[in-house]
Image (cartoon, grey):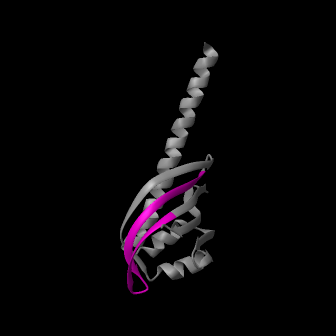
Amino acid sequence: MLRAGLLLLTAIAAFAQQDALESKVLAKERQGLDCLKTGDLVGFAALTAEDAVFVDAHGAADKAQVLKNTAEFRLDDYTMEDAKVLRLSAKSGLLTYKITESGTSHGKHFTAKVYVSSIWSERKGRWLCLFSQETAAR
């Protein structure tokens, strides 16, 4: 009986840790997207790891290239769907979701539906995006 109780407590603790990780990763992703809505490039940069890699239809880009590209990018609106977080460690997770977005990129209005995956990790007390990949949805 004691063993079953310990197993139940362990399972409850694991679910609580997963819920906390999911909440943190989703909140940080939304914070980054909100920075792109308000034009807060300093805030967006602060959420991006120095060694981050972002991948899209144009290929891979480092943090400097991503920040250069986002200087002329603004979201007007976005909606996240089907968000899922895969726990990679106690302090990192892989987030996947579909985003429907609209905004302006390099002076041109756009609307898009995109599948996104991103990896967030806590480093020295700060949550940072280490990786992001976008794939156009059909």
Labels in figure, total: 0
Residue at image location 57% in from the left, 76% down from the top: 57
Task: Determine the image quadrant of residue 38.
Answer: bottom left
Residue at image location 46% in from the left, 60% down from the top: 98
Magenta part of the chain: 92-115
Q: Position of residue 43 (x, y in %)?
A: 46, 69
Residue 103 in magenta stretch: yes
Q: Inspect this view and state whether residue 85 appears.
A: yes
Along the line of sight, which residue is nearer the eye, 76 or 50? 76
Q: Inspect this view and state whether residue 34 appears.
A: no
Q: Is residue 60 left or right of residue 28?
A: right
Q: Is residue 85 left or right of residue 106?
A: right
Give the farthest residue toward the left: 76
Residue at image location 55% in from the left, 33% down from the top: 13
Our reading of the magenta stretch's main secondary structure is strand
Give the farthest residue toward the bottom: 107
Q: Position of residue 92 (x, y in %)?
A: 60, 52
Residue 33 in magenta stretch: no
Along the line of sight, which residue is nearer the eye, 88 or 100? 100
Up-down relation of residue 24 to residue 51 (above or below): above
Q: Is residue 122 left or right of residue 40?
A: right
Q: Position of residue 134 (x, y in %)?
A: 54, 68
Residue at image location 60% in from the left, 12% down from the top: 1
Give the farthest residue toward the front: 138
Along the line of sight, which residue is nearer the eye, 113 or 47? 113
Q: Position of residue 58 (x, y in %)?
A: 58, 79
Along the line of sight, which residue is nearer the eye, 45 or 19? 19
